Amino acid sequence: MESTTPRENRTPDPAAHGPFSVLSIRDYRLLVLSNLATFAGYQIRNMAQAWIVLDRTDSPMLMGLVNAMPGVAIISISLIGGALADRTERWQLLWRSKTIIASMSLLTAVLLTMDVLEWWHLIPISLLTGAMFALHNPTSQAFAVDVVGRERLVSASSLNTGISMTATIAGPSVGGALLLLGYDTAFYVLTGLYLFSAIMIYRVRTRHVPVPSGKNMISDIREGIGYAYRTPIIRALLIVGSGALFIGMNQPAIPVKVQDVLGLGEVGYGVMLGLNGVGSLIGAIVLFIFSKRVRKGYLLMFALLMLNVAVGLFAIAPNVLMSGIAMTLMGLAFAAWMISVPVLLQTTASENMRGRVMSLYFMVVLTHQLGWLIGGAGIEAFGIQTTLFIGISGSLTVSAIAMISTPALRKAR
């Protein structure tokens, strides 16, 4: 694989060696803006869909079902997305998939305006949206290396996560206010965010020139799976990623607790999710500054432990203050996860395997979306606390298996 980028777009000032030197790369700045809009849109879509379904059906299980659909699609075709990321021109795949995602948001907004939207309409819309993210996610991760190069990947990833976490703060808070103005208003704004994201990618000049492997796509997929299985650190990271299924069980608990236990409305839900973003932003800033001093294996263990402790605190929190602290700690741990795991995967994977390795990562980590369904059903059957502690037990078990069985992951830098 080759990446073709005009020198002025890719090579920063040689005198700039600080962590912010990556911002001198024009295409990286556009990539960051695109990701900022996409991440804000992701937050608004998740919270808006969850609130609409819960409001209209009063069923945590149906709410979880709808928000699980993107994960179903991503898990189903993520391997194809990874193979395409290694076989096709990544820039085109990115802006086209973003445009289709925007069109699905616009369709939802129009159906809401016409007052004909039923909760089940969100299932096919979410499936198609998820299918586009299955193509988008591994391609976006691989394209970032094309833009900045491997040597600046940690700084770029940390900064990108920090900027994206700003969207995690603003997105839900703004989304809560938009829901008060009208459910369709939230989705019109969401459409604008996704279109802006597509335009930013369209302006990027970096191009990835694929070198044909001489094999069909099925062979490429098999080769990628075999490569990941034979590489200990990648295999262990994918096991850790699969624990996202259990962590995802806390997602439906948030709107249910906000509404039924804390007695808050749409804005309160948005603020609670915004606190999650505050924690993520703090974590990303700290890691951005100290990225070269942090051993990634230790960082991952810290993230996994703190995440589960925070979920446990949220489960037993009796009031808004304790719930807010728990959400902030969850965000802090999430930032550490989102920086350590993708960076370790991309720096470990060979150049011609990056797209396929990242597709495997997204396939396992997006089981997080399935956690919406399992968690929603669990809350209806057992209540919030029992469901969340079941999730914590599963997450810690999976993480321990990966860490204990792979010493190289614990020592990874």
Image (cartoon, helix red, strand yellow):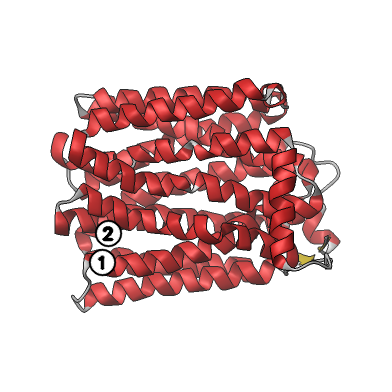
Pointer 1 or 2: first along the chain: 1
Residue topped by disc 2: 178
> What SS does tag 1 mark?
helix
Q: Position of residue 266 (x, y in %)?
A: 21, 49
Q: Residue at x 48, y 30 (%)?
A: 333
Q: Residue at x 71, y 66 (%)?
A: 217
The answer to whether 386 is drawn above or below residue 189 in the figure is above
Residue kind at label 2, given as amino acid type = Leu
The answer to whether 96 is drawn above or below residue 307 in the figure is below
Total numbered circles: 2
Q: Residue at x 52, y 47 (%)?
A: 164
Q: Residue at x 22, y 30 (%)?
A: 320
Q: Position of residue 390 (x, y in %)?
A: 33, 29
Residue topped by disc 1: 120
User: What whole-number distance in Å separates the C-alpha atoms at marks 1 and 2?
Assistant: 22 Å
Task: Say left or right for 70 vs 318.
Answer: right
Q: Are marks 1 and 2 in contact (CB under 8 Å)?
A: no
Q: Position of residue 292 (x, y in %)?
A: 72, 28
Residue kind at label 1, given as amino acid type = Trp
Q: Residues within 10 Å of mark 2 (few under 14, many from 20)?
A: many
The answer to whether residue 12 shows anywhere in this view is no
Using the image as rendered, state which of residue 280 and residue 256 is in the foreground. Answer: 256
Which of discs 1 and 2 lies nearer the camera? The answer is 1
Quadrant of the rendering where the N terminus is positioned: bottom right
